[in-house]
Structure formats: structure tokens, C-alpha cells
Image (spheres, rainbow, N blue to C red):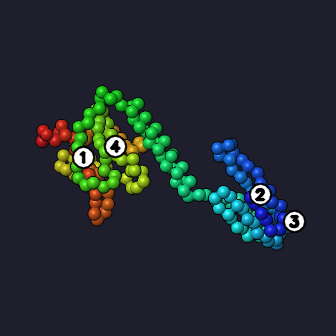
Amino acid sequence: SVSAGDTVRWVVGDTTSGGASGEQVHILVKPIAPGLSTNLVIATDRRAYHLEMRSFRETYMAAISWTYPQDQLVKRRHELQRSNDAAETVIAAAVDPDDLKFRYEIEGDRPHWRPVRAFDNGKQVFIQFPENIAQGEAPPLFVLSRQGEPELVNYRMRGNYYVVDRLFAAAELRLGEKSQDIVRIIRTDLKRRS
């Protein structure tokens, strides 16, 4: 409901937009002259808004709005889940299950972002992270050279996977400055030979 103090010199009305699932109420307020002031109370099913309004000759506010942070968070989580589901579908469609090789060990520290598993299809390596990877900082991936030196490698994030467009014998995920979390991904069929 909407209540205004001065309804003689301020015209107050409302309208709605959107469909049934996303209907939005718009409160329309128009003063009839500059130099006026009044109050406006808007009561919703969640909150009551108390506004002090003043009219000016040159300046006006075209629109104001409020958001509910909890609703935004829930919406973002749903969008993220849909994105992850779509990414897994894309990865599944691009990968023949008969070509998958689960020949990687994950060693080292145990941060919240530690990968669940790693596998390849003979061309690309897929590193699967826990679902909560998107809620914090993601670690950069370094491929280890034959001398054990870390080198940056190109990869992309698809949902909760890193997709690396090459194979590697060993790689590291590192995060942190002074106290780094380091997780190693080592290809086991090459590890035995060395």
C-alpha cells in the first residue's frame, strides 16, 4: 500500500509491469509545483519505506529502486548452477567416454578448491573442482617443465572444470602469497617410467 501526506499537491498512483512470475509494481509520484514537500510511506510484504519528498524546478529523480540482497544471492546461485549444468553437458557432448583416461593423481595441500579428479581424452586434460570453486578465488594452473619449473599454460573454465588444450606430465595449482597452497596433478603412467 502507498500513503502520501499531501495528496492535493502531489499526484500519487501505481501501475504494474511484467508477467505473473515477474510482476513488478511501480509507484508514480508527481508534484504539481516546485518548492513542495511531503512524506510517502510504501508498505510491501517485506518492508515499509518512509520517504521524504521535495519538488524542485530543475532537478528531479526519474526513478529509484530497492533490491533484496538475499534474493539476488539465491538468483545468482541458480544461474551458477544452470551454468555448471550446461558446461558439464558441453564437456560430456565433446568427450567420447571410451577415450577418457583417468591416469592422474592429485597430491599436496588440501585447500577448499582442491580438485576432485583429473582425466584426459588424449588431446585435452579436464580438471574437475568441487562445486564451491566459484565462491572464491580460483588457483592459476602451471604446467611443470622437464626440469620441474612451473610454466603458465592456457586453459579455460567450463563450469567447475579447467579445460587444458594439451596433455602434461605434471602440473601445479597455486594460490596465496606468503603461505601458498600447492596442489600437484601428476600423470601416473609417466610417473612410473621415470
In the depicted structure, whether residue 129 falls above or below residue 44? above
The residue under label 2 is which amino acid type?
A: Leu
**Mark 4 or mark 3, which has the lower sequence index?**
3
Task: Give the tally of numbered discs.
Answer: 4
Gap between marks 4 and 1, in whole Å? 11 Å
* Percent coordinates x, y for residue 193 in the rendering: 12, 38
* Percent coordinates x, y for residue 121 in the rendering: 30, 33
Q: Residue at x 28, y 57 (%)?
A: 181
Secondary structure at badge 2 equals: strand
**Mark 3 or mark 1, which has the lower sequence index?**
3
Residue bearing the label numbered 1? 106
Is residue 30 in sight in this rendering?
A: yes
The residue under label 1 is which amino acid type?
A: Ile
* Percent coordinates x, y for residue 11 in the rendering: 83, 61
Circle number at residue 15:
none
The residue under label 3 is which amino acid type?
A: Val
Q: Are marks 4 and 3 in contact (CB under 8 Å)?
A: no
Circle number at residue 8:
3
Gap between marks 3 and 1, in whole Å? 73 Å
Q: How crowded is the residue under tag 1: few (<14 C-alpha within 10 Å), some, or many (20+)?
A: many
Depth check: give the residue in front, 132 or 49.
49
Of labels 4 and 3, the one closer to you: 3
Gap between marks 4 and 2, in whole Å? 51 Å
Horizontally, residue 186 falls left or right of residue 176, namely left
Gap between marks 2 and 3, in whole Å? 15 Å
Quadrant position of the N terminus in the picture: bottom right
Quadrant position of the C terminus in the picture: top left
**Mark 1 or mark 2, which has the lower sequence index?**
2
Circle number at residue 28:
2
Of labels 2 and 3, the one closer to you: 3
